[in-house]
Image: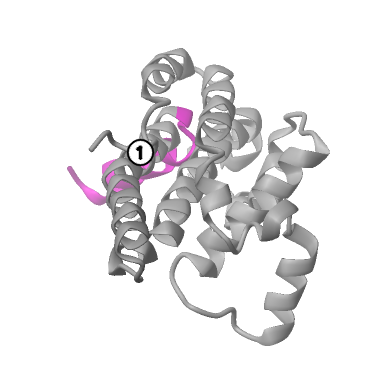
Amino acid sequence: MNREEFLDMYHAAAVKPEAWLARGMGSFLATKPLRDQYDAACRRAEKLGDFNLGQTLGPTYLMLFGYAFECFLKAAIVHKNCHRYLVNGRIDEKQYAEIYTHDLLSLWNLSGLALSTDLQKVLQAISEYTIWAGRYPFAKNADKAVAAFSSHKLDDGWPWDWDHMTDKHEMLTDMLCEIASLQPGGEYFAKLLNPLKVIGRPSKA
């Protein structure tokens, strides 16, 4: 394969919904072992009355869930805007740059899908895990952390008490299924996701 052939393949793949859906599926599947370890650590900590290192996996699990959402939403966006993004076989970087974000609410708005106020809060909260909370202990500055907390907080202190987030797994998977089913070839991914709604629930010890 020469350089031009590679570039043809690269630019065409960038606007293929199937490519984004497949990458999102990989992130989603990776959540299971992390969630299992996290839940087992919580049970051990409760039993022993002490902190368990595995409890730190909660934000990482949510970060991967956020990446799955990000890729599924980008699948919807590239499907909708392929005619703008790909010009003469090449990506228009100015147009395509609008999807260069981890902000899930912004991506959802670009996708044109309907969203309730409650689900807006959910997406805003997950975004914090993909942007920083799944990778670092602190935001870049205190103002960003305060803004995120005040605008995204749901009942019972969530999202910073991530137990509340992990309990929403089935609802989030339903949302992923809905997004997937709207894309070309998405029925295949939606069928894969439906029986996987148990992923992220506690394994029976």
Q: Secondary structure at mark 1?
A: loop
Q: Nearer the viewer, residue 61 or 94?
A: 61
Q: Nearer the viewer, residue 195 or 45?
A: 45
Q: Residue at x 27, y 51 (%)?
A: 37
- Which quarter of the image is occupied by the C terminus? top left
Badge 1 is on which residue?
202
- The span shown in magenta is 1-17
For residue 202, which quarter of the picture? top left
Q: Is residue 151 left or right of residue 2?
A: right
Can residue 87 be seen in the rendering of this structure? Answer: no
The residue carrying pointer 1 sits among few (fewer than 14), some (14 to 19) or many (20 or more) residues within 10 Å by Cα, namely some
Q: Residue at x 44, y 37 (%)?
A: 20
Q: Where's residue 60, x and y in %?
A: 40, 59
Q: Is residue 117 left or right of residue 157?
A: right
Q: Is residue 171 above or below residue 27?
A: above
Q: Main secondary structure of the magenta part?
A: helix
* Amino acid type, callout 1: Pro
- Which quarter of the image is occupied by the N terminus? top left
